[in-house]
Image (cartoon, rainbow, N blue to C red):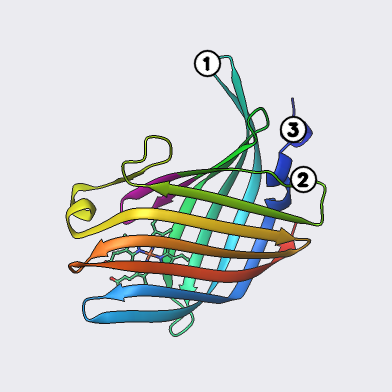
Amino acid sequence: MGVNDIDYGPLAALVGTWQGDKGVDVAPEPDGTEENPYFETIVFEAAGDVSNAETQTLAIVSYHQVVSRKSNGEVFHDQVGYWTWDPATRTVAQSVNIPRVVAVLAGGTFDGDTSGPEVVLEVKAAKGDPDWGIIESPFMRDNASTLAFEHRLEVRGDTMKYHESTSLDIYGRKFDHTDTSELKRTSA
Ligand code: HEM
């Protein structure tokens, strides 16, 4: 089957290039919090499907997100991964890979209508969770551990909004590292 003949379910709404300049990042500092306004580009590509153990078939959308600090224009977050859709169980999963050497495999159930005006994807992971977990390097485990991750992403036409919450154990305390953004689709 061609890449474009596949039923991507709710992930079809993601495909394209998205740009936004309304992002707000809240990140930890040793003695407090830093708030970083940002702009970003996220490219989502329909990437076909995969079958597992001759039983499960997943539709795949790959993505690359590049985020820059407004104050100096420099890239300060780069992320790649896949969104997958399992129509048999209505499960959506997101794999998150960041160069700090942290990987997240977050999952959730999509119970909306793929042909409705809005698609809302919600996925979660937690360290040690048997279903949807987090893996990190020994350094990050010991110094800046990611304990949990939650992501809510909404697409309405050519507008995307998301809120991500990454719970960290850093500088001897728990910190809710958050990222909120709004983007527009700039090409299909
Ligand atoms: C738009 C998305 C994101 C942006 C702009 C962003 C930005 C930042 C910034 C500015 C810091 C503070 C760095 C420092 O001062 O040392 C930070 C820390 C961190 N971020 Fe993110 N982040 C994003 C998403 C994520 C995600 C999705 C994860 C994990 C799945 C993550 C994991 C971490 C960790 C573990 C740290 C602690 C490391 C440190 O502060 O030295 N971030 N992030």
Q: Position of residue 81 (x, y in %)?
A: 50, 46
Residue 188 vs residue 127, the one in the foreground = 127
Q: Position of residue 170 (x, y in %)?
A: 23, 65
Q: Nearer the viewer, mark 3 or mark 1?
A: 1
Q: Which residues are magenta?
A: 95-105
Residue 23 horizontal side relative to residue 177, left or right: right
Q: Position of residue 68 (x, y in %)?
A: 48, 73
The secondary structure that dominates the magenta segment is: strand
Q: Position of residue 120 (x, y in %)?
A: 67, 54
Residue 83 horizontal side relative to residue 31, left or right: right
Tell me which amino acid carries mark 2: Thr
Question: Circle 3 sits in a helix, a strand or a loop, which is it?
Answer: loop
For the residues labelled 2 and 3, the Cα–Cα distance comes to 14 Å
Question: Circle 2 sits in a helix, a strand or a loop, which is it?
Answer: loop
Say which residue appears at 45% left-offset and 74% top-offset. 25
Say which residue appears at 68% left-offset and 52% top-offset. 14
How would you rate the neighbour count of disc 3 (Cα within 10 Å): few for under 14, some for 14-19, many for 20 or more? some
Residue 179 horizontal side relative to residue 182, left or right: left
What residue would you read off at disc 1? 53
What residue would you read off at disc 3? 6
Residue 118 horizontal side relative to residue 128, left or right: right
Say which residue appears at 74% left-offset and 25% top-offset. 1
For the residues labelled 1 and 2, the Cα–Cα distance comes to 27 Å
Question: Circle 1 sits in a helix, a strand or a loop, which is it?
Answer: loop
